[in-house]
Amino acid sequence: MNLVTLLKKVFTSGANFKDEKTRDQVFHFNFFAILFGIISAVSGIRHLLNNDFLSASVFLGLFAFILLVVLLPPFKKFPFGGLIIILLFEISAVYSFLFGERIPFGWIFILLFPFFSIKLLGTKNGTIHSIALAVLLITSYFLPFSGISAIISGSFLINFFLIYFLGLILIFLAEDNKKQQLNELIKQSEENVQELRHKNEFISDLSHQLRTSLSNIILVNNLIYNSSLDKNQKELIDTLRASTNNLLEAVNKIVNFSQPDLIIKKESFASFNLTETLGNIVNLFADKCEIRITLDVSPNIHNFLLGDPIKLKQIFLNLLQSILFSDGSLLIDEVIINVIPEKETKSEFKVLFNIDVKYSGSDRPNENSDVVTPRLKADFTNTAKLISYSGGQLNISQTGNTNVYSFILSYQKDLSKKSDEGSGKILIDEPKSVNLNQSNVLLVEDNLINQKIVILSLKNMVKNIDIASNGKEALEKFGTSKYDIILMDIQMPVMDGIVATKKIREIESSTNMQTPIIAITANALSGDRETCLAVGMNDYISKPFQVDILIQKMKNLLNKKAV
């Protein structure tokens, strides 16, 4: 660790910074202020010992004011704090010239002034203040009552300010070059992001096309296989099915190898009930694992909140998925989700989310080992990004046999609505179970071939199937007919499946009922499943799929006793 790194660590310890520029400003602010304060204090004490009480009061007063600037939070805001400390130095330097004061190390400190001025105020303003200080000092030197002219010669002053302006020019050029390099990096980064976006869109479109075609081939194979075929024909179909499965495996490998990083989708802003939102996520996992998951929302959070419920769902989907399924070597006994108001005002809640993961038996984590395994750390990367983009920070700690995952997010209160006050729960009507053969199904699919194949696969299994070619048609049919379950495609013209699902859930929010929705989509990239579940879909199946799996998912949702 070099000296500069060590000093930065000392002068910026115990603080959080939104970016490296702010950290750099705080470091130079503290460093400059402390040196300036020490010089002022030494000057004040020296004058006090010489019984020069006027100068002593000036420099000790300056020292006291510097302490206020350093310690009080309002002064630490940039560029305000930097401007105050720069002006104080300019005033003290002019005072020294007028009254012939030799500040200890003052000349060296003046030479350093352009550097700190530019660092604290930026290239333009810092240069202006550096030139202004030089002009003020030179003018002060030639005033008739200037005390410094009797102490130093004019030649010394000329040489000094030649060095001063040379240093200013070098610092200006260095900062300007640094700024240009930063702009180049930003431009290159934007180009890389754009290139990555195009690549991801290409992979997504290619995957969608391949999966749609493979899905049709597999479903048609199944229909033909179950028809009246002789032995040789069935062997041919078996070979075709095996080849299709091999092709599907190759597509999956391509997608997995090239899957994009987390893409932050456009934020939604809506009124939502926190308990209901998290309860739906917990129910999704409760059906898929035997681990006990407990949701405990503080009764003090009885307002509906205004914010982005979809992003909150994505955060919990990613977290719980990573915790419960990413590392099978650890034996989890229980997961407890605590939701507590960290800070409350008349219009806002800061909510603390704590996920306590308790381990049991010999597989519990060692207290002296890392809190999470490397596999989990990799899985948490996207979740940490989501939380960061939402204004929070994911913290992970370990106490005994419990891992604790926590973060804080801010939401506005929706004062026009209230949930079941004092209980932390919302009451939802339990839907009646429906047998699959008595179910009324809405299939939302824009591809005519896909429509025909799904209808051929399900027509003998259900009571009725209605077709909608896009999300807009689905909303119209949903408004006029009652459906027991909806099979929703994602990529469609006019209105896609994500938007259609959001609107359906908004319509249902006033009825306390939810129609089960299964996403049937060729989208199978990283995050697609989480996005579907986050907007309110109950399950997800990617193309190509086996009809038996779809039927089982439909039965599970139709026979479910709770939303």
Image (tube, rainbow, N blue to C red):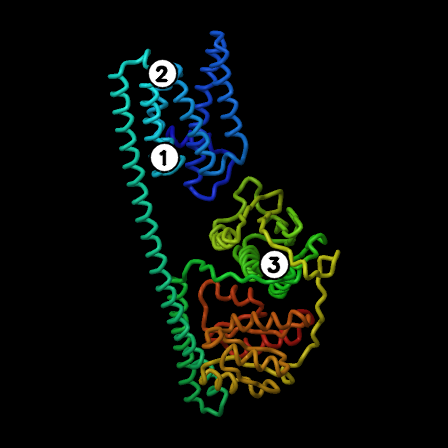
At label 3, the amino acid type is Leu
Tag nearer the camera, 3 or 2: 2
Label 3 close to label 2 by CB (< 8 Å): no
View extreme (right): residue: 422
Image quadrant occupied by the C terminus: bottom right
Determine the image quadrant of residue 263. Answer: bottom left
Find the distance from the CA under tag 1 to the CA under tag 3: 43 Å
Decide: is 250 above or below 184: below
Q: Earlier in the sequence, mark 1 or mark 3?
A: 1
Q: Earlier in the sequence, mark 3 or mark 2?
A: 2
Residue 25 seen in render? yes
Mark 2, Cα crowd under 10 Å, few <14 / some 14-19 / many 20+, is some
Q: Position of residue 129 (x, y in %)?
A: 36, 32
Mark 1, Cα crowd under 10 Å, few <14 / some 14-19 / many 20+, is many
Q: Which mark is drawn over residue 429?
A: none
Residue 354 seen in render? no
Q: Which mark is drawn over residue 146?
A: 2
User: Please, what secondary structure does the residue beneath circle 2 have?
Assistant: loop
Image quadrant occupied by the N terminus: top left
Q: Position of residue 312 (x, y in %)?
A: 57, 58
Q: Say which residue label 3 marks.
A: 306
Q: Position of residue 429 (x, y in %)?
A: 71, 71
At label 1, the amino acid type is Gly
In this picture, residue 341 sits left or right of residue 243 = right
User: Please, what secondary structure does the residue beneath circle 1 have?
Assistant: helix
Q: Say which residue label 1 marks.
A: 126
Tag nearer the camera, 2 or 1: 2
